[in-house]
Structure formats: structure tokens, C-alpha cells
Image: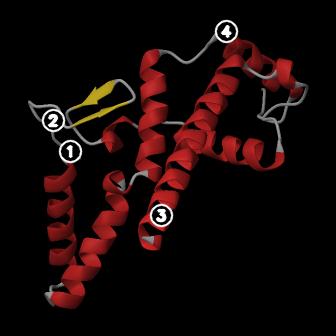
Amino acid sequence: MLTRHDPLWELLLITVLNEATLDAQEDMMIRSGFYYLTADKFQCEHKIDQFYDMHIKRKQMAPMEAMEEAERMVEAQNSCNTVKDSLMFSIDGYDYNTCVCNFIHPEFNFFIALFGEYDKHGTLPFSGALGDQPAYIMDTLALLRSLKLDKDAEDRARQEKQQNSRRR
């Protein structure tokens, strides 16, 4: 029986992943996960926590009632569990008629962990050189890197604009 730490398992996994590259649906799901993590309007779980705290403190609601109300408010804002007839968001060429939290890749947390190690330390996911890495994983890391660079550039531009407006 093969285990995750068995070299034969790694070879099998690399062989399978080398045959695959990101398709359009997986690309969209990776982008959705990235925007869910980085864009304030899509951080549904964080918003639920904020609304919950607000209901407990300001409205003196019982905890269960406050959680239900917080979930209803986020649902109304982002349409997390419903599909609307009209377009809600258009991001990177993909159109959404529901919240992006419904489209996150099932392995997104794994990809983010790999990307963190790769981005911070240059650690490759599998043994061997860059050319020995699975194409699927490298495509995913390249997409996440591109999205991060774009977000960093947007953040810098926004900060410069704010600094320039304060100087005036």
C-alpha cells in the first residue's frame, strides 16, 4: 500500500499532475478563492462574525438569534446561497450571479499553503528542480503569484493616491 511519503506515491502524483493543466473552471475557482480571501466585499465568514458581534452588543440579542440574523444580512448582501437572474460581479472575465464563496476550489487551502512556502522561501512542493514539478501545481502557483502581484500593485496605487490627497 502506498503512503503519501512513499517515493513511488510522489512519482505517481507528479505523473498525473504533469498531464494536467488548469482548465477554465479551475482557473475561475482559484481566482474566486483569491478574491474571497483578499476583497473585503467577499469575506462572508468574517462579515458574519462582525454582524454577530454587532447584534450581540448593540441589539442585546440572544446568541442563536444574533447568528441567524447575521447570516441573513450577509446572505442579503452577497447572495451567498442563492443565484440571481442578473449579473452581480464580473471579475477577470468571469461573470458571477452569486457570491464568489460558492466557487472556491476544493483544494484551495492546499494551494495557498504551497504558494506561501513558494513565495516566501522559494520552496518547491515536490523534490527536484523547477522542471520536475507538476505542471498543474506550477500553473496554479503562477496564477496565484500573478493575482498577488496585481493586488500588491493596486494596493500601492491606492496608498499613493491617499497620500497625495492628504498632501493637498
At 8% from the left edge and 30% from the top edge, which residue is drawn? 85
- The reply to whether callout 1 and callout 2 are in contact (CB within 8 Å) is no
Mark 2 or 3, nearer chain start: 2
Based on the displayed image, in which of its 4 quarters is residue 33 positioned? top left
State how far apart marks 4 and 1 are (Cα): 34 Å
- The reply to whether callout 3 and callout 4 are in contact (CB within 8 Å) is no
- What residue does disc 4 label? 19
Q: Residue 164's mark?
A: 3
- What residue does disc 2 label? 83
Asked whether the viewer can see residue 105, the reply is no
Front of the two marks 3 and 4: 3
| Mark 4: amino acid | Glu
Q: Residue 81's mark?
A: 1
Based on the displayed image, in which of its 4 quarters is residue 63 positioned? bottom left
| Pointer 2 local density, CA inside 10 Å: few below 14, some 14–19, many at least 20 | few
**Image quadrant in which the C terminus is located:** bottom left
Asked whether the viewer can see residue 119, the reply is yes
Q: Give the structural element (helix, strand or loop) at label 4.
A: helix
Mark 4 or 1, nearer chain start: 4
